[in-house]
Image (cartoon, rainbow, N blue to C red):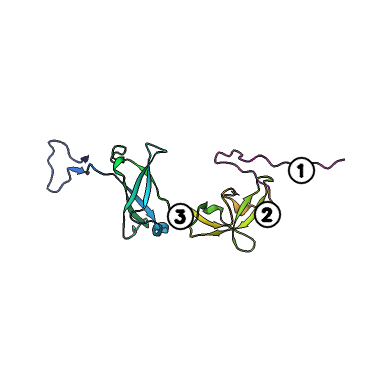
Amino acid sequence: MIASRQAEAGQVVAAGQTVFTLAADGAREVAIALPESGIRQVAIGQPAEVELWSRPGERLPGTIREIAASADAQTRTYAARVALAGDALAAVDLGQSARVYIPLEDGAGLKLPLSAIQRDAQGRTAVWVVDPASGKLASRPVRIAAYASDEVPVLGGVGAGDWVVAGGGHLLREGQQVVAVDRDNRPVLPAAPRAAAPAK
């Protein structure tokens, strides 16, 4: 299949000049760059999922087919290719952009953004946890695994139902009352009840 044309009909070309760029009209692959921090967690043959930018929410099955032996000298990332399953041939056109999801077996089911990790008064790794009933903060020590590029796996200390402060932890203090909001700055927890005024 002709992927691109570098010359027009009737044009005089020099020896060795590229006229067409060809692509095999067969199985589809997605070229990605793996960060150096997570290269040990990815292996050839590992399953992956591909989501096309033109078809958000629909994930196609694939596998890691190739990983470069050395990192790029400038970006410090490893070039890799994800081969799509044969039944995805009709759904993917050449040159499309996609997002690749690779499940990592790192022993931790929970992950937090790097901005959530703080140091408590004893110098331990900790996070700020919000009490949903009172809206007050408490510093809680956590056990974490190796840092990734923008998140860290949590091995213990918080659970899936805990409300953790994701940013600005260095400005907070123990027992401070906060309001949990979503990405659009809308409250996501009911307001904590105010203390009753003393009787006169």
Which label's residue is closer to the chain start, 2 or 1?
Answer: 2
Task: State if disc 1 and disc 3 touch (CB < 8 Å).
Answer: no
At mark 2, the secondary structure is: loop
Q: Picture coordinates of residue 149 (x, y %)?
A: 45, 54
Whichever of callouts 3 and 1 sits on the residue coming sooner in the sequence is 3
Amino acid of disc 3: Ser
Q: CA distance from mark 3 to mark 2?
A: 29 Å
Residue range highlighted in magenta: 177-200
Residue 149: mark in rendering = 3
- For residue 199, side relative to residue 9 (left or right): right
Label 3 neighbour load within 10 Å: few <14, some 14-19, many 20+: few
Is 132 magenta? The answer is no
On the question of residue 32 being in view, the answer is yes
Please give the residue where the numbered disc 2 appears in the rendered image. Answer: 174
Please identify the residue farthest to the right as the structure is shown. Answer: 200
On the image, numbered disc 1 is attached to which residue? 195
